[in-house]
Amino acid sequence: MRAHSTLLSEPLRSADELPWYLRHPGALSKPRAPWCYERRKPEDTVLHDVVSRNLGACLSAAQERGEHGFGYPAFVGREFEKYLDCGQLRRGFVRVKCAECPNEKLVAFSCKGRGFCPSCTARRMSNTAAHIVDNVLPALPYRQWVLSVPRRVRFLLATDHDLLSRVLDMALRKVFAWQKRAARRRGITAPMCGAIGFVQRFGSLLNLNCHFHNILPDGVFAEDINGDVVFRPVPPPSKADVQTLAKQIARGTEKLIAKREQREFDDERPALLAQEQAKSLNESSFRGGGKFKTIEHPSRRHAFFFGYSLHAERIAPSGRIVGAPRDSIFHLGGEQENEIWRIQKSSKRTS
């Protein structure tokens, strides 16, 4: 099994300062049992049983409710059907044979779905996180910026991919601009910024809730006198900074929505799916109008503005990564007490 890197919230100085789960490993201190592959059996789960018994009726009912009998888009039915075939030996498998003994195992094909299958989505989530931590992110301090939007905007983002991309790009540019201003005040010339953004389309109740999780270094990148790229920390955002950014992002989003409504927009998406998406939202949230207003929040770096929420409280100080591979695409050097990390690109190219 793949060992994932772990981000520690504080630098480690002695064994007494180790987290509780490292000082008391529990089951991890016991001898590990021999690894043995066991085929997962999705057909024995409640989810598989519910989907297999009700999928046909659900799609038929959607055709009856939909305009012109179209029902849901074709990809909805395909996603469920792929899930029902995932992990089923009758749908294909590979024979895996031990090189040292005559034992063999049959490994069923997976559906590799992106929207519904719990096994495939969890595997993709874990692999993506491991790749980003091990091969992409240098060992720097990182801050998470979470942007949530009003419910009426969530519906527009869910049904318009172009608007979704524009809003994310605009929001990141606003944060980049703040970071560059903070860097210039510290005498840093030509600062550069970067981020990794993820779009999450659901909330804790599996309701429609398009929002953004963005990971940004708590600083900027700039060239030193030798032409090498170095990392230069900037002061963390204050509550006033987060409030200002929330206002800017809210107004920028409303401008993008206004431009969208002005141009002719041909939506080829069947109307029924949009209706189902709207049902998961509170209808009262679609009422527009009113003036922008700010709501105070007790968190130091959490601001609300006209239904928009910007949270920047969570940070991984010093970006300490445990178990990072030596062939990472970034190699770090320099002295932490000087608050400068020198970054050199590895000769290893990634696709």
Image (tube, rainbow, N blue to C red):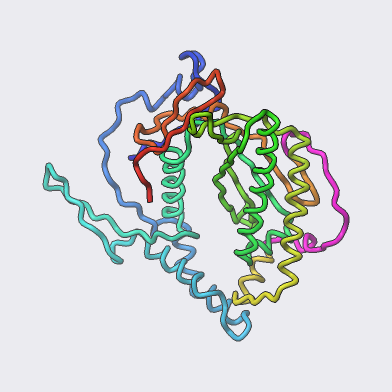
**Residue sitting at x 82%, y 62%:** 288
Q: Residue at x 74, y 34 (%)?
A: 299
Residue 53, percent across and down? 47, 69
User: Quadrant where the N terminus lies?
Assistant: top left
Q: Is residue 86 above or below residue 22?
A: below
Q: Position of residue 130 (x, y in %)?
A: 43, 41
Our reading of the magenta stretch's main secondary structure is loop
In the image, farthest residue toward the bottom = 68
Q: Is residue 331 left or right of residue 315?
A: left
- Residue 214 lies in what quarter of the image? top right
Q: Which residues are magenta?
A: 280-302
Q: Nearer the viewer, residue 332 or 225?
A: 225
- Percent across and percent down for residue 267 are 63, 75
Tell me the quarter of the picture where residue 62 sits: bottom right
Would you say residue 254 sits in the magenta stretch? Answer: no
| Left or right of 198 in this view: 261 | right
The x, y position of residue 204, in whole percent, is 62, 49
Q: Quadrant of residue 260?
A: bottom right
Residue at left 62%, top 80%? Answer: 66
- Nearer to the camera, 195 or 2: 195
Q: Residue furthest right?
A: 291
User: Is residue 297 magenta-colored?
Assistant: yes
Instruction: State whether residue 349 is above or below residue 143.
Output: below
Query: How many circles with numbers are drawn on the protein?
Result: 0
Q: What residue do we see at 64% from left, 52% from top?
A: 211
User: Which is more toward the observer, 35 or 153?
Assistant: 153
Above or below for 253 versus 13: below
Left or right side of 300 for 37: left
